[in-house]
Image (tube, coloured by chain):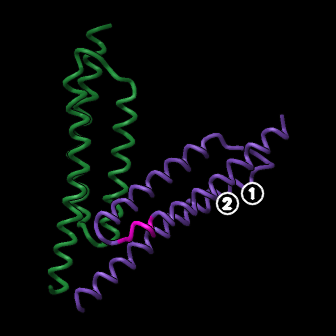
Chain colours: A green, B purple
């Protein structure tokens, strides 16, 4: 295997791993969205924040290690942040409606 | 550059980055150790825990990405954890002495 092929393979692998971790957070957001009406777990917000922080550190590391373009990392995080903002908005509306 | 040279270079770079992050935590621990007698910042513990979590996620990612041996990652974390345990012990002794 040539060195450029290897770099491509490692970068692909890195992106795949980050995407897996992003998907896990996505699922956490989805589950909480579906449970809006029934129950609200107060720890959800903290768990999500922690997971987002963990992912951002992984992305930052991958960029510094030369396996990921900074723009791709930012895009991955930005997408999750939009979903997270939607969840928090829905939570706030739900809280106002029930109070 | 051959692909094995590239992998070696990337692995070396990864270890260097992780060591840098570990050193930052080490400095945080050191600073708090030196300030034991004068003042105690209640947020220190939380900052250190967060930084340790961030580093553990980076190490985990580097192992999964094939850039780091699992044993080397564990060793890096274990060393910091020992220092952290010493700090917490010193904090506890200091607290008992002043109460």
Q: Which residue is mark 2?
A: B30
At label 1, counting other C-alpha atoms closer than 10 Å, the crowd grade (few under 14, some 14-19, many 20 or more) is few
At label 2, counting other C-alpha atoms closer than 10 Å, the crowd grade (few under 14, some 14-19, many 20 or more) is some
Q: Is residue A13 left or right of residue B24?
A: left
**Local secondary structure at mark 2:** helix
The magenta-colored residue range is: B68-73
Residue at (22% x, 15% y) in the render: A37
Q: How many marks?
A: 2
Whether residue B62 appears in magenta in the rendering, the answer is: no
Magenta stretch mostly in which secondary structure? helix
The residues tagged by marks 2 and 1 sit, at their Cα atoms, a distance apart of 6 Å
Quick one: which residue is furthest to the front in this view?
A: B71
Residue at (15% x, 87% y) in the render: A2
Residue A35, image x and y in percent?
Answer: 23, 21
In the depicted structure, whether residue A98 falls above or below residue A53: above
The chain letter for the residue carrying disc 2 is: B
Discs 2, 1 touching: Cβ within 8 Å: yes
Dividing the picture into quarters, in which one does residue A98 lie? top left
Residue at (61% x, 46% y) in the render: B44
The chain letter for the residue carrying disc 1 is: B
Q: Do tags 2 and 1 sit on the same chain?
A: yes
In the depicted structure, whether residue A37 falls above or below residue A16: above
Q: Which residue is mark 1?
A: B34
Q: Which mark is residue B54?
A: none
In the depicted structure, whether residue B98 falls above or below residue A17: above
Residue at (53% x, 47% y) in the render: B49
């Amino acid at each position: 295997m040539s060195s450029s092929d290897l770099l491509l393979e490692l970068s692909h692998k890195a992106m795949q791993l980050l995407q897996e971790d992003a998907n896990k957070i996505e699922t956490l957001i989805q589950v909480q969205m579906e449970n809006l009406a029934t129950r609200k777990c107060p720890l959800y917000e903290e768990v999500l924040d922690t997971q987002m922080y963990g992912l951002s550190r992984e992305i930052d590391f991958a960029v510094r290690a030369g396996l990921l373009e900074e723009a791709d990392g930012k895009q991955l995080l930005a997408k999750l942040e939009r979903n997270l903002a939607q969840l928090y908005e829905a939570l706030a509306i739900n809280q106002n409606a029930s109070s």
